[in-house]
Amino acid sequence: MRPLVKTIGIALTCLLTLPSSYADDLAEILDLALDNDPALRQARAQYRSNRELLVQGRAALLPSLGVGGTTQRQTSGPTDSQYATDPVTGEVVRTQNDHSFRPGINSHGWGVNLSQALFNLPAWYTYESAKATDRAAAMNYAAQEQDLIFRVAIAYFDVLRAIDLLETNLQEEEAALTSLEQTQRREEVGLDTIIDVNDSQAAYDLARNTTILQRDILQARYEALEAITGRPHPEIEVLREDFPIVSVDGELQEWEAMAEENSLAVAAAEYNLQASRETLQARKADRYPTVSLDGSWRHFVTQPITREGITIGGGATDNTNLALTLSIPLYTGGALSSRRRAAQYDVVAAREGLELARRQLTQNIRNSYRRVNTDVLVIAQRQQSIVSAQSALDQTELGVEVGQRNIVELLRARENLYRALRQYAESRYDYVLDTLALKQVSGLLTPQDVLDLNEWLEIAEETVQ
């Protein structure tokens, strides 16, 4: 985790030096998310809580020191009063009172206890297991940080995606309205029929309805971004048109090797397996003897007893004790065997978890690698489809003017053009997110990737909301 934390620290320093603008950019939003995202703060608190298990495991190997004290009052006496007959007067007199709490003996004392484990294999292996568990938790926390970077990118580019789609819908709505007005005028002079007017009206209504829905989607995307940072972002910078679309640098085998070396999920699974093995060793060692050194010192003060003018006992005494304690478990009702079997199953589960993580890593890295390269081809093809759809629309509009094409063909050609524009916008943002996903799967995603991507953002001339 340390290299990632160091990278994040460097990145945040760079964020503070970025020039301010009227619109928020990706780097500024990531900076806010690192401080305000509830999911990351929850993961951070959980990680720190789990780290305390390491301290608790080490404590079993360290000496324990305690101080204690006592104070007490002791009384004694017959349960009933005792009586006798006076030989002179013949009267019955009480010769001894019954028990009372007022006369008594006060005593107090205090002492120090010290205990140190000399031979305790279960505690040692438990501590080793706690260290491996802590390393696994560190990997999981680093993965949460990477996940935040990716979630911020998804939320940010989903807003840009919704903005582009809304702008395209508005253009389509405007074109449909213009076409409707032209068709109505042509119908008035007898060049078009009422059927053509109805078709144009239906196309405009559909475009208008899509615009309404897209506005709601855009607002939802803004709110999803706000949920991560804790504050609204009414304007954000947009992706430049000259953003480079390139294939993945390197062969698939190289990315698989990098992923195997840097994957946080695989590293966490390896540490979990190590922790399970150490726990199994601890459970096997539960039957071994344990040896501890125990020492104590006591200081005790007792009040003397005075009877018939004679003082008995009392005073202060000191007592020391030093012992080696040997403990060997012989029979525990089957608990030790059961705990050992459970630990063995945990090792099997952790081993299978590691194998699952490696297989998923291989699958994900291949899919991500292939997806990025596919995005490059798709974007190039969709750029060509825009050119083709625009050319087809121009020809259809010309054909309508000379009476060789009808309004239905015109509406279909326009629909194809705007569908191509929407698909092109979608594919650009898919490429950006798939590129980040490839780095996340391989364990290479850092805030520096956001800073590099941030260089390709610019303030939009006008943001549609």
Image (cartoon, rainbow, N blue to C red):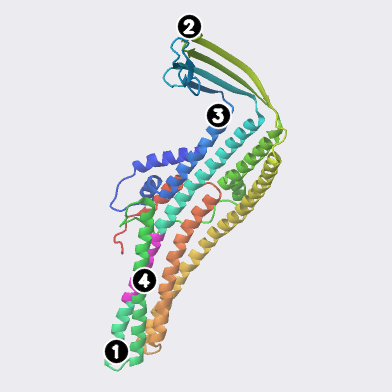
Q: Nearer the viewer, mark 1 or mark 2?
A: 2
Residues packed near mark 4 inside 10 Å, few (<14), some (14 to 19) or many (20 plus): few
Q: Are marks 1 and 2 in contact (CB under 8 Å)?
A: no
Residue 135 sits above or below residue 384 on the image: above
Residues packed near mark 3 inside 10 Å, few (<14), some (14 to 19) or many (20 plus): few
- Reading the image, the residue beneath label 4 is 213
Q: Secondary structure at mark 2?
A: strand
Residues packed near mark 1 inside 10 Å, few (<14), some (14 to 19) or many (20 plus): some
Q: Secondary structure at mark 1?
A: helix
Q: Position of residue 276 (x, y in %)?
A: 64, 41
Residues packed near mark 2 inside 10 Å, few (<14), some (14 to 19) or many (20 plus): few
Q: Position of residue 134 (x, y in %)?
A: 55, 38
Q: Position of residue 404 (x, y in %)?
A: 40, 89
| Residue type, numbered disc 1 | Arg
Q: Nearer the viewer, mark 2 or mark 4?
A: 2
The residue stretch that appears in magenta: 158-174
